[in-house]
Amino acid sequence: APAQLLRVAVLSTIPAALIEEILTRGPPGAERIELLEGTEREVLSLLDRGRVEVALTAINPSTDRFAGERLHEEGYGLALPAGHRLAGAETVEGEALADEVMMVRRHCEVLAQTSRYFTDRGVRPFFSYRGAGDEKVLALVRAGLGITVMPDSYRDPGVARVGLEGFTPRRVIGLCYAGEAARSSAFVQAARDVFDGM
């Protein structure tokens, strides 16, 4: 008999490496997974319409109408090429980035706060790239095209992660359920295990 189908919505700003780890951690063939990706609003719409059974997304007041559970909380910081002059710093003041070339992650949940943070400090950089694909942005950072602000869970051997002084937004990643059936799924248990190990 074919395995049970589990339809999962995934927030597009969750690193692909984490999704890969979740999918490879579960028992092979335990479930047939259908993944749909989107923004916070799109993910919640999929839940509302019963198009998915579970969502891996940001937990905030807009998700309160769904049963859910928190898995991980993280902040945001700079992503710099590993050879960048500031790559060894623990934190950097925004003003120190006035001459840096930056990239914009158009779908970032804290884009308005990021823009305000730099504007308040008189930093109006040249933008070398504006796009939506986080893995592409990481590759472009690695290649030296510019720097950007990303959630802390994005890691890459060629990219240094540095804190941004006074930039305090945080996000909670968790699971939201359209019903109870998905709570015991292999995907959900694997997601709990992966985020528990972070």
Image (spheres, rainbow, N blue to C red):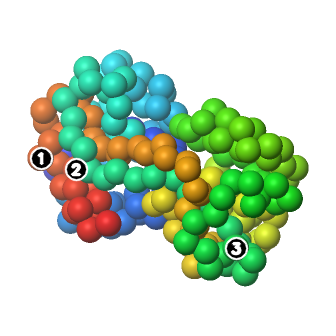
Q: What residue type is labelled 1?
A: Ser
Question: Disc 2 or 3, which lies upstream in sequence?
Answer: 3
As rendered, which of 94 and 2 lies closer to the eye?
94
Query: To which residue does mark 3 refer?
Result: 86
Residue type marked 3: Leu
Name the side, left or right, on which 76 lies relative to 183.
right
Which residue is depicted at the point 41% across and 44% down? 171
Estimate the x, y position of residue 11 in percent, counting from the top left.
45, 41
Residue 27 visible? The answer is yes
Residue at the disc numbered 1? 184
Answer yes or no: do the residues labelled 3 and 1 have beta carbons within 8 Å? no
Tell me where residue 163 appears, x and y as whole percent. 55, 62
Nearest the viewer among 97 and 141 is: 97
85 to 113, vertically: above or below: below
**Circle nearer the viewer, 2 or 3:** 3
Q: Nearer the viewer, mark 3 or mark 1?
A: 3
Q: Provide the residue designation for mark 2.
A: 188
Residue 163, above or below 177: below
Taking the image as shown, residue 41 lies to the left or right of residue 9, namely right
**What secondary structure is marked by label 2?**
helix
Label whose residue precedes the other's in the sequence (3 or 1): 3
Counting from the top left corner in percent of width and height, residue 156 is at 56, 72
In percent of width and height, residue 188 lies at 22, 50
The quarter holding residue 59 reads top left
Between 82 and 30, the one lying in front of the other is 82
Residue at mark 3 to residue at mark 1: CA–CA distance: 45 Å
Mark 1 nearby-residue class (10 Å; few <14, some 14–19, many ≥20): few
Dot 1 and dot 2 residues touching (CB under 8 Å): yes
